[in-house]
Image (cartoon, coloured by chain):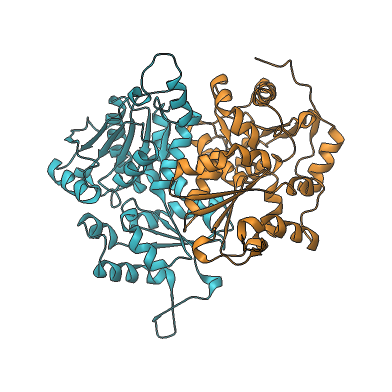
Chain colours: A cyan, B orange
Amino acid sequence: VSDPRPIGVFDSGVGGLTVLSEIVRRLPAESTVYLGDNERAPYGTRPDDEVVAFSTQSIDELVARDVKAVVVACNTSTAVALGHLRRRYDLPILGVVRPGASAAALATRNRRVGVIATPATVRSHAYFNAIKEENPAVEVYEHATPAFVPMVEAGRLSGPQVAVTVAEELAPLLGERDAAGEFVFPLPPSARIDTLLLGCTHYPLLRPVLATAVGERVAIVDSATATASALAELLSVNGLEAPGSSRGTAADAGHDGHDRPVDQAGIPIHVQLTTGDVDRFRSIAGRLFADAFTDVQGVELGAPVR
Amino acid sequence: VSDPRPIGVFDSGVGGLTVLSEIVRRLPAESTVYLGDNERAPYGTRPDDEVVAFSTQSIDELVARDVKAVVVACNTSTAVALGHLRRRYDLPILGVVRPGASAAALATRNRRVGVIATPATVRSHAYFNAIKEENPAVEVYEHATPAFVPMVEAGRLSGPQVAVTVAEELAPLLGERDAAGEFVFPLPPSARIDTLLLGCTHYPLLRPVLATAVGERVAIVDSATATASALAELLSVNGLEAPGSSRGTAADAGHDGHDRPVDQAGIPIHVQLTTGDVDRFRSIAGRLFADAFTDVQGVELGAPVR
C-alpha cells in the first residue's frame, strides 16, 4: 500500500516552515505542498470565526491540489479550528498541539513542564489543556515570549544580543521573584521545570540559544519534530506512505522483479504557496532554511466558505 | 463524528495489560476487548511465520468482535508481523514500537538512549531501528534484561531483593567494565544515557524501582504510555472517538437540546479474552492491576490462516 500524493502543510505565515523542514527530514520520500496565508497573518489577533473561515479557504486550496493529508502547522488554527476542519474534510488532518503536548508529557521526569508560545497561544491554553489531557499530574507553566517571532523573522537567530533577549524572556519561567520583585536564580530543584515545550513554530530556529539558556538538565521538546513523528505514524497506519518510504518498502521495491532502482520510486517535489508577497516569502525562507524551499509561488484563494 | 465500537488490544500474554491500562486511563470513554494468546506465549522464541499466523488468528477474533482499531501490544508481533497485519486488515493497526521510539527520541537531551527489553526484542533491533529512523544522530544502547518478565509475572514488583536484581540487570547499561572486568560507576557524563526506554510491556510495572536505580537525571519512557497517546491521536484524526470522549465532544453533547446527561453517552465495557487458563490469567491480572480487569473469558481461535 502506498500513495504518491503530496502532504499539505498549512500555516498563517512562514513559521510552519519549521514543521515542513522536520517533515522533509523525517519523511524524505514524501512530496509536500506548503500554503502560507501571509496576506492575512498573524491569525492570533483575529476572532475565531475568521480563523475558521481563513483556515478552511486555505485547506480547500490544498485539497484542490490533491493532498493525501494535511498538517495544520499553525498553533492558532489548531487551537481554534481543528475540530471544524476534521468534520469538513474526509482526509486525515493533524494539528501541532497534541503531538508536542504528548511528547512533553512523556519527556518530563519531575512532572513540571514549561511552555513558551505567542501571547495568543498562551491565552488559548491549548497546550495546557492538551498536556493535562495526557497526564493531569503534570504541572504546566505557560509563558508568553512575544519578542521571539519578530526576532526570528528578522533572521536574528544567534549572537550575544539574541542570548540576552532570550534570557530575559525566559526569566519568569526559570526564576522566581523575591520580596523586592527581583528574579532569583536558581529555583530549588523541586520547583524547576525539567522540560521546555516550544509552542510556536518559529521557536525551533532558536533552539541552540534556548538550550544554552535553560541548561543541560532541561529537555527541549518542539512541536515541529513531534508533529513530523506523529505524521510518520499516521501515514504508516493509514497506508498512505509514498512509494519507497521505509526501509521495508524500499527493500520490497528492489525485489519486485521490475529491475528498477529504488530511488526511481519517485523524486519528491516541494512547492510553497503564499497569499502574500512572493519575494518577501522567498527571502525569509532563504534566510532561515538556505536553499531548502525555493519553489515559492503566489496563490489566490477561492471565495470565503461557510 | 464518533464511533462507540471497542478498541482491540492484542498480546501474546498478560504483558499487554500495561498498555490496556494506559489506554483506559488515557481514553476513559472507550470500550476495549483484550486478547492474550497465553496458550502459545511467549512468541519471542517462535519462527516469524508462526508469529504472523498466530497474530493473524488473534486479530481475526478481535475483528469478529467488531473492534474499530487494533493495538498490537506485543513487541515481537509488532516487530515481525505489523506490516503483514496492516496489509491484511482495513482498520487502523497500531504497534508499540514506534510510539515508544518516537517519545524516546524526543525526550533525550544528550542523544543517548538506553533500551531494555527481552532478549528476543533486543535481537530484532526493532527499537534501535525505530529510534534511528526518528533521528539517526541518537546513540541507542540496547540491553536484554531476561530476569524481569518472570519476576513481574510472579508479582514481585518492589522490595530490596527486586531492587538488587534490577540494579544487577541494568549494570551493563549504566556502568562500564574496567581492565579487571568489573563495572565502574559512574560513567563520565558524556557517556551516560539520559533516557531509558522500556521496550517490554511488562516493565512499566517495575517503573518505581527502575526510577530509583537509574536516578533522577534519566527520563524513563515507556511504550505503553506512548502508545496510548498515539492511539488517542489516531482515533481523533480518523474520527473514531467514542461518544463523549473529549471535553469538546462532551460539552457539545450537553448542548444538543436532547437534555440527556453527558455520562449517558455510554458506559465503557472492558472484556479480556485468553486462549490459556482463565483462572491463571485472572489471578495474574488481579495481582498486577487489582480489580481493573476482571471480566476474563476463555476463547478458542479459528483455524490458522494463510
Left or right: where does residue A188 sit relative to residue A119? right
Q: Residue at x 79, y 61 (%)?
A: B159
Looking at the rendered image, the quarter that the C terminus of chain A falls into is top left
Give the percent coordinates (x, y) of residue B250: 55, 41
Q: Residue furthest bottom?
A: A180
Q: Residue at x 65, y 60 (%)?
A: B211
Corner quadrant of residue B175: bottom right
Q: Residue at x 60, y 67 (%)?
A: B186
Q: Residue at x 79, y 39 (%)?
A: B294
Q: Is residue A27 visible?
A: yes
Corner quadrant of residue A119: bottom left
Corner quadrant of residue B284: top right
Q: Residue furthest right?
A: B279
Q: Residue furthest front?
A: B179
Left or right: where does residue A172 sit relative to residue B70? left
Give the percent coordinates (x, y) of residue B162: 77, 58
Residue B179 versus residue A279: which sits nearer the camera? Answer: B179
Left or right: where does residue A190 sit relative to residue B133? right
